[in-house]
Image (tube, helix red, strand yellow):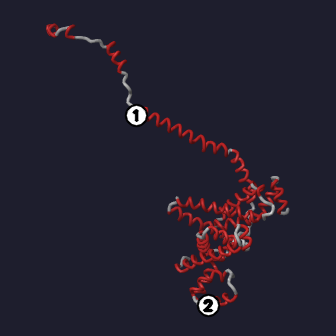
């Protein structure tokens, strides 16, 4: 089934078309959400909501746009909303809770990657360090970096998703990388790992 | 090329964003400086994390979960009007009425009870007529007994 066929059938409420859509784009959406929230379970939850939103608002989809671009946009917006709500919740959390959350994040990483032969404690710590550095980036830099690193999108594709010019995306990625480097160097100096 | 310049450019070097000339300069410095080489190796490992994290496997139950969530949200969607009505209309009305009753009863309790002077004097006149005990029974007769 082609993309156009899927969209047409989805507009008439076809369930097999929806199944096909989920199967085709599941990896894309989950990966994008994971790049933003850095937790597999949360990423899958958000991805499920993305597909539900697509199912409900498929009639709003313009035929001239690419379906993947639309999916990226919804996934990014949903993930940013999730991060915002999580921040609000964390603001009310005590110190103990935040320590517990960090331990859980480490356990989560260990659980998801325990079957990976090279994935050991050092790698887990590296992952937590990188996630924190990415999470600390300004919103637009975070989105551009995630789409570039986790989805390997080109500058023009990122520009299309973010509704920006290619030069703006270049600048965003340049600043994101600079900020990450600063944070990682500071941590290297302090011997965080 | 010194260490400070390398620290500024390293991430772009590792990501392959630098022009050939600059890349060669950085490579030359990395061969000479063990400290920078160690930092470069550490940074490379950290950036590699994103490559390892890219999911290649597909959750086989994903579609089933999406479908279940969709059906669940549809049933919830029907009752959403009732929920909104309950939360946005009935609750405020109920608490407003409760507040008004509270204020009213507070005012009522706080008010002094008005004494009906007319009726009370009438009552006194009717039930307790003036009685001159001294006339009825004088103290002398009382003591004599």
Occupied quadrant, residue A182: bottom right
Q: Residue at x 68, y 44 (%)?
A: B79
What's the chain of the residue with tag 1? B
Give me the disc on residue B4. none
- Give the residue pinned by disc 1: B110
Total labels: the figure holds 2
- Could you confirm whether marks 1 and 2 are on the same chain? yes
- Give the residue pinned by disc 2: B29
Occupied quadrant, residue B20: bottom right
Q: Find residue B81 and report its horizontal and vertical position in percent.
A: 67, 44
- Residue B51, visible in the rendered structure: no
Q: Find residue B102 and report its horizontal and vertical position in percent.
A: 47, 37
Between label 1 and label 2, give the one nearer the viewer: 1
Which secondary structure, mark 1?
helix
Q: Residue at x 83, y 56 (%)?
A: A9
What's the chain of the residue with tag 2? B
Q: Establish if A73 lies above or below B1.
A: above
Q: Residue at x 77, y 56 (%)?
A: A58
Occupied quadrant, residue B135: top left
Q: CA distance from mark 1 to mark 2?
A: 88 Å
Q: Earlier in the sequence, mark 1 or mark 2?
A: 2
Q: Is residue A104 left or right of residue B65?
A: left
């Amino acid at each position: 089934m082609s993309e156009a066929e899927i969209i047409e059938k989805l507009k008439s409420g076809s369930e097999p078309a929806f199944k096909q859509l989920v199967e085709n784009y599941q990896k894309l959406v989950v990966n994008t959400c994971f790049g933003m929230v850095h937790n597999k379970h949360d990423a899958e939850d958000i991805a499920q909501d993305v597909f539900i939103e697509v199912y409900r608002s498929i009639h709003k989809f313009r035929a001239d746009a690419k379906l993947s671009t639309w999916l990226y946009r919804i996934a990014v917006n949903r993930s940013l909303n999730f991060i915002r709500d999580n921040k609000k919740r964390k603001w009310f959390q005590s110190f103990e809770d935040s320590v517990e959350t960090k331990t859980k994040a480490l356990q989560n990483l260990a659980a998801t990657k325990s079957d990976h032969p090279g994935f050991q404690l050092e790698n887990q710590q590296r992952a937590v360090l990188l996630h924190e550095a990415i999470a600390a980036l300004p919103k637009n830099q975070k989105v551009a970096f995630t789409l570039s690193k986790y989805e390997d999108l080109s500058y023009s594709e990122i520009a299309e998703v973010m509704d920006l010019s290619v030069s703006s995306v270049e600048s965003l990625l340049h600043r994101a990388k600079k900020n990450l480097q600063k944070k990682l160097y500071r941590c290297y100096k302090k011997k965080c790992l | 090329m010194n260490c400070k310049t390398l620290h500024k450019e390293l991430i772009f070097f590792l990501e392959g964003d630098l022009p050939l000339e600059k890349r060669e300069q950085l490579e030359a410095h990395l061969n000479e400086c063990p400290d920078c080489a160690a930092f470069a190796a550490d940074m490379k490992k950290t950036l590699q994390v994103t490559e390892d994290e890219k999911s290649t496997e597909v959750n086989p139950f994903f579609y089933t979960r999406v479908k279940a969530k969709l059906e669940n949200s549809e049933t919830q969607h029907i009752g959403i009007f009732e929920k909104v009505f309950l939360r946005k209309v009935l609750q405020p009305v109920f608490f407003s009425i409760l507040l008004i009753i509270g204020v009213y009863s507070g005012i009522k309790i706080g008010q002094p009870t008005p004494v009906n002077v007319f009726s009370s004097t009438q009552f006194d006149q009717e039930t307790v007529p003036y009685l001159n005990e001294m006339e009825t029974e004088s103290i002398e007769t009382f003591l004599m007994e």
